[in-house]
Image (spheres, grey):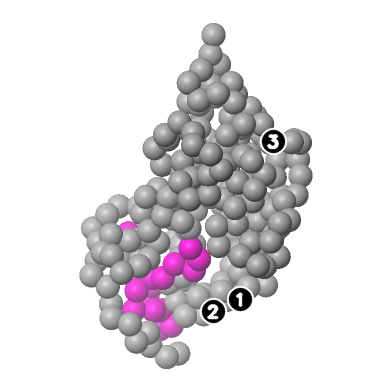
Amino acid sequence: MLADSRKVPKILPLSIPVLYEDDHLAILHKPASLPVSGNQFRTVENALPFNLKKSPLTVAMPWPRPVHRLDAATSGLLTVAKTYPAMVGLGQAWEAGAVKKKYIAIVWGNLPATTGALTSPVNGRSAKTIYQVLRTSNHPKLGNLSEVSLTLETGRTHQLRIHLSALGNDILGDLIYRKMERRKIRGMWLFSTEIKFLHPITREPLNFKLGKINKIEKLFIPHS
């Protein structure tokens, strides 16, 4: 294997919850407001060596690397490779659409149906999102809100945000694609909650899913 020519990053001493780890890969729960990578120091990638054990395998990379991206404002499940074969295998699985990902979003208003498919192009490319409304709330301060499960059939940049905005149901806190001025919300209410794929080395089926998200539960407390 060719060595990674990039300079080993300065380690960011920031704890990130690790949900699974073996010698080849890991699954982390990325916090909101933290970029996955980039030129700045405070990124997930720079924090990986602080949170993960170094792989003892000869095919280990100099430092762990994220396999995919999440928007900085999005929290949830993030897959990380620790070896070159894992990085290649996971990358191929993503390209082939063999990785199944689900998200939860809190959006403004009520959707036109309880289930549906959103298929409008994203940045000139075909895109498809399957949605299912999980519950709705008439919040005393925010008005009508919906909790929506989202399944990515394609993986375009900002696909979920663009599709929901086009539907007229912006994600709470999305400052880029909002259609109208709404009540100011802190953070974006989009969460990567489930991921399924075959382990790139052992071919074992892996399925990771987040439990209830407390900040969402608080939105749907019954109001008298």
Q: Identify whether 50 is placed above or below 63.
A: above
- Picture residue at 59% right of the left edge, 26% below the top: 144
Residue 177's spot in the image, x, y percent?
53, 49
Residue 71's spot in the image, x, y percent?
46, 56
- Which amino acid type corresponds to the residue marked 3 in the rendered image? Leu
Mark 1 highlights which residue?
92
- Residue furthest to the top in view is 224
Tag 1, which secondary structure?
A: helix
In the image: residue 124, left or right of residue 113: left
Marks 3 and 1: CB-CB under 8 Å? no
**Image mark for residue 111:** 3
State how far apart marks 3 and 2 are (Cα): 39 Å
Q: How crowded is the residue under tag 2: few (<14 C-alpha within 10 Å), some, or many (20+)?
A: few
- Which amino acid type corresponds to the residue marked 2 in the rendered image? Val
Pick whichever of labels 3 and 2 is earlier in the sequence.
2
State how far apart marks 3 and 1 are (Cα): 35 Å
Tag 3, which secondary structure?
A: loop
Which region shows up in magenta?
A: 47-69
- Which amino acid type corresponds to the residue marked 1 in the rendered image? Gln
Marks 1 and 2: CB-CB under 8 Å? yes
Residue 147, quarter of picture: top right
In the image: residue 37, left or right of residue 8: right
